[in-house]
Amino acid sequence: MALRLYDTLTKEKRDFAPIDPSNVRMYVCGPTVYDFAHIGNARPVIVFDVLFRLLRHLYGEAHVKYVRNITDVDDKINDRAACDFPGLPLNEAIRKVTERTESQFHDDVDALGCLRPSVEPRATEHIAEMRQIIEKLVAGGFAYVAADHVLFSPAAMNAANGLLPRYGALANRTLDEMIAGARVDVAPYKRDATDFVLWKPSKPGEPSWPSPAGIAVEGRPGWHIECSAMSWKHLGETFDIHGGGIDLVFPHHENEVAQTCCAFHTSRMAQTWMHNGFLQVEGEKMSKSLGNFVTIRELLEGWKGYSWPGDALRLAMLKTHYRQPLDWTYENLDQTHKFLWDWYLDIEDVAPSSVVPAEIVTPLADDLNTPAVIAGLHVLHKSGRLDELKAALVFLGLSADRARIHRWPMVPLVDAGAFNDANNTVLAAAHRRSLSGTIAAQNADSSVAIQKLVDARTAARANKDWKESDRIRDELAAMGITIKDGKDADGKPVTTWEIAR
């Protein structure tokens, strides 16, 4: 079966032809370990886990190598370490932060059904490789030393002859466009605005190592050189697939290409570049300022008494094609949870088929067309091919085990006051809608309770007790209920209610 993948560099979907079919190699940019991973971080982890599973299916488990790095040297890590462990030397505090958050990350993505990569290198364990690449770049005239920094020159790269790609080709931008569209660090020692840091001097107390290129003071690597070094160490100068989020195309991946190709005089770093689209929450960009920032751990363990199983999070993520923007809604998550529960109930005592059905493998081989895969799962269920459904679910990284997911719905309708102390009012409101929507649709007692409130408001309006009417309206709204006032065929006042959307 032919595998076709969309390549960000060429902007087309092409047949995938590995450099060596007996050694298929993939690198994906991993987490910077300083805090719990948010739900947006989960998207590339899940997407490339599905690709990893597909590659192993097509080429054999022993013939696929998946590398996902861990960034453990970064300004955000330094800040968190100083904040969490103020009484410890910074280097010791950093180690505590990175070990703790790496463990948290593993626990979370394990719960999402993701396989561990073949290799998971830490940046700080590859300083020697970073220094080697930097030395090669300086010797080749692509990098220079200034004020105890080593900087890469995109202009020098574009002026070179030979097989080297053009700097900016991956992002499809010129140097001028990149200057205009990006935040460029201004420094008097830089020759050009687009020059970026390969190595910089460490501040007092920061992690430091002997510097390359004859620099006397100790320093630490820039962000981009880390992935070039780790991919080179574990996959070679050129490999098959490089993946990550669309936000990494520029500058991170563009700079990786520049460093690697100039250091090793190659035309390509990766044969195929793959990038997943952005994630937003309930139609808005996820951010702490908007109050809709949510971590994987919060969704798994519970937000004000309600949680979702990892299988539901995983499948909800796959309902949107990986290259498209994903709108993460709690209504969609609830729907996914519901049909997973129904499927798992039906296949509980069924032995899985030994063959993954074509309804799953064929769309996956077409640039990971997971929406078509979800449609295929529904077909398998409706047609009673339950042994194939179970095999398909397991192949996709789902447990297919009802004991692994809690019952849907699992939480009774709660007093809206339970959410009053929520720091995240937007997310709390979303959960109120989710709870009231799922329960009210399934639980007759809840419907009766809602109707009693609606009737009480109708009586208050008839008595012109507007204060009580407004109070009940607000109580219903807090429960996720929308009320509509109108008139019946005889012109008499009537009030209806529905679940807020």
Image (tube, grey):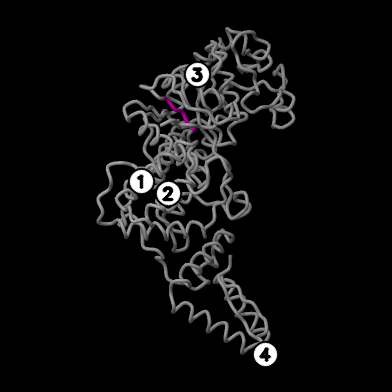
Label located before the other in sequence (3 or 4):
3
Q: Residue at x 56, y 9 (%)?
A: 214
Q: Residue at x 57, y 27 (%)?
A: 253
Residue density around tag 2, few if under 14, some if 14–19, many if 20 or more, within 10 Å: many
Q: Are marks 1 and 3 in contact (CB under 8 Å)?
A: no
* Tag 4 secondary structure: loop
Amino acid identity at mark 3: Met
* Tag 1 secondary structure: helix
Helix, strand or loop: magenta stretch: strand
Which label is found at residue 376?
A: 2
Q: Is residue 349 above or below residue 182?
A: below
Label located before the other in sequence (4 or 2):
2
Q: CA distance from mark 3 to mark 2?
A: 46 Å
Which quadrant is home to the N terminus? top left
Q: Which residue is mark 4?
A: 490
Q: Nearer the viewer, mark 1 or mark 3?
A: 1
Residue density around tag 1, few if under 14, some if 14–19, many if 20 or more, within 10 Å: many
Q: Is residue 141 above or below residue 423?
A: above
Which label is found at residue 43?
A: none
Q: Which residues are magenta?
A: 25-29
Q: Nearer the viewer, mark 2 or mark 1?
A: 2
Q: Nearer the viewer, mark 3 or mark 4?
A: 4
Q: CA distance from mark 3 to mark 4?
A: 81 Å
Amino acid identity at mark 4: Asp
